[in-house]
Amino acid sequence: MSSETTEMRAAGITTVRSVHSLRAQLRRWRQDGDMLALVPTMGALHEGHLALVRHARGLAERVCVSLFVNPTQFGPNEDFAVYPRDEAGDAAKLEALGADLLFAPAVEEMYPPGALTRVSVPSLGDMLEGEHRPGFFTGVATVVSKLLLQALPDIAVFGEKDYQQLLVVRRMCTDLWIPTRIEGAPTIREPDGLALSSRNAYLTADERRIAPSLHRTLRAVAEGVLVDGADPIERAAWGEAELLRAGFDAVDYVAVRDAETLAPWPGPSRPGRVLAAARIGRTRLIDNLAVA
Ligand code: PAF
């Protein structure tokens, strides 16, 4: 155990808070020839995150999980202040899964006084989520580029639940020559189809009953364009109306897009993805599905 005061063992897993300690630990593993996978998270870990950690364990000898609620990816009216936080619970879950290291930096470690640089991915990061949450993907790309350069993992694992985020991170790594392989892991769902998300905790019992219609509607949109040959724009508009009928209060978008570029889907010659964001009460849910 290092003498760094920032380092401690919580529930058996080593937690480091400084980039210095992170790099010292990772250097040891690298010298042993171990492959390293990083799983970036904002904590409040649920089964969806744990599946990412399991995925990472299958790909590399060492798994580091980062836990950082990143202020730069929250808009002024979003839930940064109340975002669920449970570091001790998260550490216990990671320990039980056999993750090797938890990196839980403070805001000042990630954004020291004087830090100015931001990373943005125009176009891909400006549409869909980017249009409805201005600045969101710049916050994500900035913090993920920092995490990847701090840890220099061989592999980093992101959930397909945040499909556009996965594409933005891949694009950023390619464009900046960041030598980390970006792995997407499948979305984990409740038995009724609702994708696992930390924000599901905000749903009231009534809202929770409405929420699975998001997944059902995405399936119907995907089937409509693929099996029935429906026009993707008309089918997406049908999907938006369907969500409102099911009880959602507002729909930010339903869209059928090219799975790699997020340009409008040209048809079955290209892989497609249907993506949506909708609000019930104070909760905003997103989901997506392959058109396959
Ligand atoms: O998906 C998330 O939890 C976050 O956007 C990420 C990738 C950890 C960056 O803060």
Image: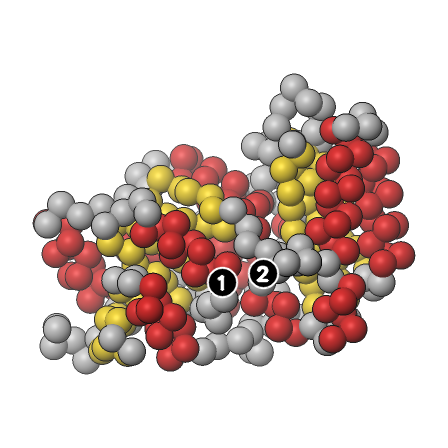
Residue 132 higher or lower than 224, as above or below: below
Give the residue type that dot 1 points to.
Answer: Glu
- Give the residue at x 16% y 76%: 4
Q: Position of residue 204 (x, y in %)?
A: 73, 76
Residue identifier under label 2? 196
- Give the residue at x 22% y 46%: 35
User: Residue 47 has which mark?
Assistant: 1
Residue 111 higher or lower than 130, as above or below: below
Q: Position of residue 215 (x, y in %)?
A: 71, 51
Residue 5 higher or lower than 274, as above or below: below
- Give the residue at x 34% y 64%: 97
Q: Is residue 222 left or right of residue 176?
A: right
Q: Position of residue 26 (x, y in %)?
A: 19, 56
Mark 2, secondary structure of its residue: loop
Q: Quadrant of the C terminus?
A: top right
Describe the colour scheme in one phrase: secondary structure
Mark 2 or mark 1, which has the lower sequence index? Answer: 1
Asked if the residue at tag 1 contacts the one at tag 2, i.e. Cβ–Cβ closer than 8 Å, the answer is yes
- Give the residue at x 43% y 61%: 50
**For the view shown, which residue lies furthest in the top direction?**
269
Q: Quadrant of the N terminus?
A: bottom left
User: Residue 105 has which mark?
Assistant: none
**Residue 103 in view:** no
Give the residue type that dot 2 points to.
Answer: Leu
